[in-house]
């Protein structure tokens, strides 16, 4: 008796996971008062990172990203790296998500594809 996979003619090799390839260890970037004292922190102006019309998303609300956002903006605006952000409520995590989406939209608008 044939099972559903055989009836549908699906090649069982499609169920095999891809070969394991070792990837580089993730970069762990911790922002704290010990490694980034308040007097050393800089806010990045929105104009320095994004061009119009994308920067208009934030310029109607603020002119510069906060400290935490400024730490992450170069990675989110200029790379396809994956990130995980853990921060308190109100720290600006939603804005980080918007930055990543803005990069995707900007690439699509310019006809570029992701790496």
Image (cartoon, rainbow, N blue to C red):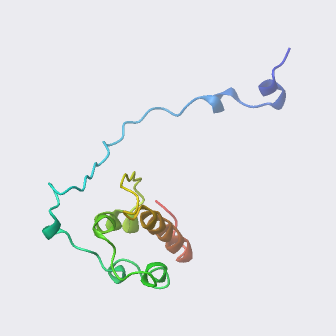
Q: Is residue 48 above or below residue 99?
A: below
The foreground one among 6 and 77 is: 77
Q: Is residue 61 above or below residue 41?
A: below
Q: Is residue 5 left or right of residue 66?
A: right
Please state the total of marks drawn on the protein image.
0
Q: Is residue 73 left or right of residue 107?
A: left
> For the point 55% across and 31% down, which residue is it?
17
> For the point 40% across and 58% down, which residue is it?
89
Q: Is residue 81 above or below residue 50?
A: above
Q: Is residue 90 left or right of residue 104?
A: left
> For the point 52% across and 77% down, which residue is it?
110
Provide residue 36's location: percent of width, then percent of height: 17, 60
Provide residue 12's location: percent of width, then percent of height: 68, 27
The foreground one among 88 and 8 is: 88
Q: Kindly indicate the quadrant of the structure image that contains residue 43.
A: bottom left
Q: Which residue is the extreme one toward the top?
A: 1
Q: Is residue 34 above or below residue 26?
A: below
Q: Which residue is the extreme one toward the front?
A: 89
Which corner quadrant holds the N terminus?
top right
Provide residue 113's location: percent of width, then percent of height: 52, 65
């Amino acid at each position: 008796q044939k099972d559903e996979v055989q009836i549908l003619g699906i090649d069982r090799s499609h169920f095999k996971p891809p070969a394991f390839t070792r990837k580089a260890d993730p970069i762990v970037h911790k922002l704290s008062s010990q490694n980034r004292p308040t007097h050393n922190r800089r806010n990045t102006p929105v104009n320095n990172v994004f061009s119009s019309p994308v920067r208009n998303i934030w310029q109607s609300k603020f002119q510069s990203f906060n400290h935490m956002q400024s730490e992450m903006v170069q990675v989110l605006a200029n790379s396809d790296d994956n990130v995980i952000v853990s921060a308190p409520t109100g720290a600006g995590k939603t804005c980080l998500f918007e930055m990543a989406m803005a990069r995707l939209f900007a690439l699509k608008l310019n006809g570029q594809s992701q790496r």
